[in-house]
Image (cartoon, rainbow, N blue to C red):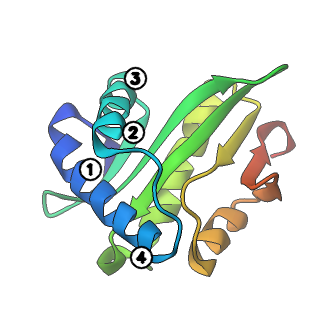
Amino acid sequence: MIRPGRPADAGGIGALFDAYRTELAAAGRPEPRDTATWRRWLDRRISAGDVRVVVEEEDVVGYIAWALRAAVDRRVLSVTDLYVLPSERGVRHGAGLLARALDRARADGVAEIEVTAGLDDDAAHGLVRSFGFVAVDGRLVLALDAV
């Protein structure tokens, strides 16, 4: 089940963030945010309604977090965190989470959505590209007025 993140989910999301950091480090791409800074950011994102979680048998097994940012002539929804436990991959949890971010962007009238989350493997790139995202300056971007 995918639902909005709640303050009570922060511990479970934090455990996923630790696993995400470990995977990124193993791929030679360490996560630049320290845990305390990230946790403050997560709390703000949860309060703003910018987090969705996948829950299986009461455990958080995946999450997505985003923030709206202003560009010169448009607003952009920037997905910075997208992670699903390895044991839960392959059952479309990531696709469901990304679809929720797209729903939010469209509902808010956002012109563009970008994914900057650690896309270190072919499966992650394939997932995001399957939604129509294209590579632009190290990000995967989808112009929503083109969809």
Residue shown at the point (35%, 35%) measured from the top left: 37
Q: Which of the 4 quarters of the picture holds residue 26?
A: bottom left
Residue at mark 2 to residue at mark 4: CA–CA distance: 20 Å
Which residue is under mark 3? 48
Residue at mark 2 to residue at mark 3: CA–CA distance: 8 Å
Q: Earlier in the sequence, mark 1 or mark 3?
A: 1
Name the element at disc 1. Answer: helix
Residue at mark 1 to residue at mark 3: CA–CA distance: 16 Å
Which residue is under mark 2? 51
Q: Which of the 4 quarters of the picture holds residue 146?
A: top right
Q: Earlier in the sequence, mark 1 or mark 4?
A: 1
Which residue is under mark 4? 91
Amino acid type at mark 2: Val
Amino acid type at mark 3: Ala
- Residue nearer the viewer, 60 or 137: 137
Amino acid type at mark 4: Val
Residue at mark 1 to residue at mark 4: CA–CA distance: 19 Å
Percent position of residue 119, x then y: 59, 65
Q: Is residue 29 above or below residue 2?
A: below
Which quarter of the image is occupied by the N terminus? bottom left
- Circles 3 and 4 in contact, beta carbons < 8 Å: no
Name the element at disc 4. Answer: loop
Residue shown at the point (63%, 79%) measured from the top left: 122
Tag nearer the camera, 1 or 4: 1
- Circles 1 and 3 in contact, beta carbons < 8 Å: no
Tag nearer the camera, 1 or 3: 1
Q: Which mark is residue 13?
A: 1
